[in-house]
Image (tube, grey):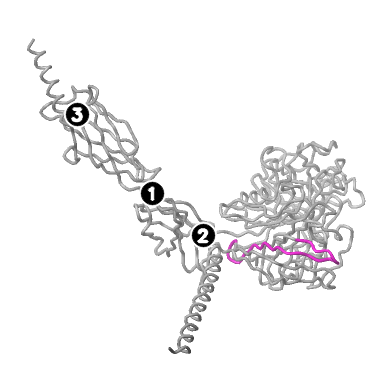
């Protein structure tokens, strides 16, 4: 016996088993990551990578993160880890949205606040709502645009005073702490306390710096006049807002005055007469906007009780619908009085106008802008933000910009003030280092901190856990939005195992599309999920080998020129395959309890039948729907001995689709396999004999 040879063979067998085991393990891991990529969610178990603030006094260690793509180039990250300050290690949950904004490609960072819910159209104002509601309102006011996610924005005055919670004498509209720009409109250039600093503008232009920062100078109060197509005719200076001297333009040549109420408070908290109405009289024609889209004073040099910061600030827009030499203005109205002949030449009933204070040229290129509390990082360096508010663990909300020009929206969970869960300001900087943030700004913290992310159903999930226990009502939000591709997608042919769809792109959202794809996802008869992806050719696409009577969700994907990736859109819906046609297996004629009973046995796997009728001898029709079979009863007089079946005809009415038209199958008696018992003939013969005897006598 060759012991060496036997040992070698055993060793080879053992090595082969080890090799097979290694390959199995490799393929299991490979399959796991394939599934994760298919779901567009990739958990990354970090090797406890630690990031420090500049002076290394605070750090953040990321232990696990999950990244998902919300849209092409827009990601959401859930990042779990811990911070260390001194000997204290604290678990942290950080949430990050990232996007490289480009307005020319329909990808933007925007601000928004709800102006009136529509419940009191004659008394509009800014309203506090939760962040999800603000996101929904943005979409409502911007058809074709979708919010991908966002965070709470600037802090706000919510009780019309200069201090949080103060309910008192301020007669201005509820407003943020700092300036706010939305849709290219300067809603707030100064607030009630005279603040115009701490504002960041978003350029949404990758060819420029992603943001403009710093205290801004205003360059004037202007009236924008548009034609009937809302094309700008020109901008004209406004010289006064609610002047001290009545009829000021009447005695001053080439001047313009705007009149508007001070308070837009829907809750009627202020009692000043200036908040209820304003009488205006002029020797000129007043151009009146009596139902403005927006109209609010946020500060005034003549009415502000906060005298140290009294300055005029107003925004309004709407259509001129009236001219008069005297009017009484109420909420949501404003009037223009001018001796500027050039302006008078273009103003008329029907003119659309907008009045706003302009910023300097650098900020004017920004269509969006929002205020902030503190500068966290600037020019890739940490800022000294040491104060009592920043030197405690607290829920935080931050936005910033990376070295490649991407925008970051970041929040962290936290308990109430004094708890360990939450971030110190310097710990924020350590977290920001992980995401390559070079410039960052902290916004409203605490119970207002919220992040929402769009889910697959088009709703908004709150991913943060508020210290209030629920989503707080806030004034404004900062969002990532995209202008979605618009398409008409309709079923052309729906068979039992195939669907043909018509797909027509109506709006490419400014993007260069190379190819278009449609995806179907649904479950087959076995309950297994099926996914199909086909290219749209000549505005048509066909899917084969589908299960009958099945519902599929379709989604539109596009491939941009110069890119091999298939990018999803929000164009989606549902479609069904047709039901299998029902058929008659057989029918039976029986005699029971003095009556004939007709039973029709059908094959109807997809429950297509709506009702089934039987008629005979051209007489009465009987029907009664049962599961998988139908029973029809008739009396003996309806039959005759020569043909006991009596020229029976079966009518099956069915729907191929649940909401489709009702169709009919007609079956003559020779098209159906009939069964009948001998008693049928005997009873029929007996009845006929009895009938004949009765006729004789």
Total numbered badges shown on the rendered structure: 3
Q: Residues within 10 Å of mark 1 (few under 14, many from 20)?
A: many
How far apart in space, not on screen, are marks 2 and 3 (Cα)? 59 Å
Residue 137, numbered circle: none
Which percent across, then down, holds residue 269? 82, 37
Q: Residues within 10 Å of mark 2 (few under 14, many from 20)?
A: some
Quarter-wise, where is residue 360 in the image?
bottom right
Residue 315 lies left or right of residue 667; in this view the side is right
Magenta-drawn stretch contains 87: yes
Residue located beneath label 2 in the image: 507
Q: Residue furthest front?
A: 1
Closer to the N terminus: mark 2 or mark 1? Answer: 2
Which percent across, then down, holds residue 532? 43, 61
In this rendering, the label closer to the viewer, 2 or 1: 1
In this rendering, the label closer to the viewer, 2 or 3: 3
In this rendering, the label closer to the viewer, 1 or 3: 1
- The prevailing secondary structure element of the residues shown in magenta is strand
Q: Are marks 2 and 1 in contact (CB under 8 Å)?
A: no
Tell me, yes or no, if residue 538 can be seen here. Answer: yes
Which percent across, then down, holds residue 674? 19, 37
Residue located beneath label 3 in the image: 618
How far apart in space, not on screen, are marks 2 and 1 (Cα)? 33 Å
């Amino acid at each position: 016996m060759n012991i060496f040879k036997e040992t070698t063979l055993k060793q080879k067998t053992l090595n082969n088993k080890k090799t097979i085991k290694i390959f199995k393990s490799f393929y299991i891991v490979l399959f796991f990551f394939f599934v994760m990529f298919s779901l567009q969610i990739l958990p990354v178990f970090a090797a406890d990578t630690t990031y420090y603030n500049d002076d290394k006094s605070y750090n953040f260690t990321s232990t696990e993160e999950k990244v998902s793509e919300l849209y092409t180039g827009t990601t959401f990250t859930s990042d779990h880890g811990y911070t260390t300050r001194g000997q204290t290690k604290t678990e942290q949950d950080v949430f990050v949205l990232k996007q490289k904004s480009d307005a020319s490609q329909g990808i933007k960072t925007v601000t928004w606040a709800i102006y009136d819910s529509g419940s009191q159209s004659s008394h509009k104002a800014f309203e506090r709502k939760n962040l999800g509601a603000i996101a929904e309102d943005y979409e409502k006011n911007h058809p074709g645009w979708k919010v991908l996610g966002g965070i709470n924005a600037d802090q706000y005055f919510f009780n019309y005073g200069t201090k949080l919670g103060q309910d008192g004498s301020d007669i201005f509209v509820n407003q943020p702490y700092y300036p706010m720009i939305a849709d290219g409109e300067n809603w707030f250039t100064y607030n009630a306390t005279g603040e115009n600093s701490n504002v960041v503008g978003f350029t949404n232009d990758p060819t420029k710096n992603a943001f403009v920062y710093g205290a801004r100078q205003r360059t004037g109060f202007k009236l924008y006049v548009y034609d009937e197509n809302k094309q700008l005719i020109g901008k004209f200076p406004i010289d006064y807002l609610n002047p001290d001297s009545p009829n000021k333009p009447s005695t001053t040549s080439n001047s313009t005055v705007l009149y508007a109420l001070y308070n837009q408070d829907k809750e009627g908290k202020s009692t000043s007469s200036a908040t209820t109405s304003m009488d205006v009289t002029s020797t000129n024609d007043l151009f009146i906007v009596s139902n403005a889209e927006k109209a609010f004073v946020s500060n005034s040099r003549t009415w502000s009780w906060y005298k140290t910061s009294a300055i005029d600030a107003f925004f309004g827009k709407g259509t001129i619908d009236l001219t008069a030499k005297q009017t009484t203005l109420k909420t949501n109205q404003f009037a223009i009085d001018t001796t500027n002949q050039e302006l008078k030449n273009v103003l008329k009933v029907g003119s659309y106008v907008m009045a706003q204070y302009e910023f300097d040229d650098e900020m004017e290129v920004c269509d969006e802008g929002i205020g902030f509390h503190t500068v966290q990082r600037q020019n890739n360096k940490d800022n000294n933000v040491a104060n009592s508010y920043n030197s405690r663990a607290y829920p935080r909300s931050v936005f910033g910009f990376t070295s490649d020009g991407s925008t970051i929206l970041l929040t962290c969970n936290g308990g109430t003030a004094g708890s360990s869960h939450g971030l110190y300001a310097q710990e924020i900087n350590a977290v920001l280092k992980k995401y390559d943030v070079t410039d960052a700004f902290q916004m409203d913290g605490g119970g207002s901190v919220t992040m929402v992310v769009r889910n697959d159903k088009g709703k908004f999930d709150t991913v943060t856990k508020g210290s209030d226990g629920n989503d707080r009502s806030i004034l404004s939000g900062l969002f990532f939005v995209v202008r979605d591709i618009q398409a008409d997608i309709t079923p052309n042919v729906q068979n039992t195992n195939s669907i043909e769809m018509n797909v027509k792109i109506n709006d490419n959202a400014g993007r260069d599309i190379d190819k278009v794809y449609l995806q179907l996802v649904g479950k087959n008869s076995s309950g297994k999920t099926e996914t199909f992806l086909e290219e749209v050719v000549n505005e048509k696409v066909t899917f084969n080998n589908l299960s009958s009577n099945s519902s599929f969700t379709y989604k539109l994907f596009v491939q941009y020129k110069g890119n091999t990736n298939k990018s999803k859109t929000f164009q989606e819906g549902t479609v069904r395959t047709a039901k299998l046609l029902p058929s008659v297996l057989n029918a039976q004629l029986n005699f029971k309890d003095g009556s004939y009973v007709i039973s029709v046995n059908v094959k109807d796997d997809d429950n297509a039948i709506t009702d089934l009728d039987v008629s005979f001898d051209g007489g009465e029709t009987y029907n009664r729907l049962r599961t998988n079979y139908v029973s029809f009863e008739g009396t003996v007089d309806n039959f005759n001995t020569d043909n006991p079946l009596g020229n029976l005809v079966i009518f099956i009415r069915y729907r191929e689709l649940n909401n489709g038209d009702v169709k009919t199958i007609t079956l003559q008696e020779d098209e159906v396999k009939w069964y009948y018992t001998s008693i049928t003939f005997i009873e029929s013969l007996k009845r006929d004999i009895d009938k004949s005897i009765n006729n004789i006598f």
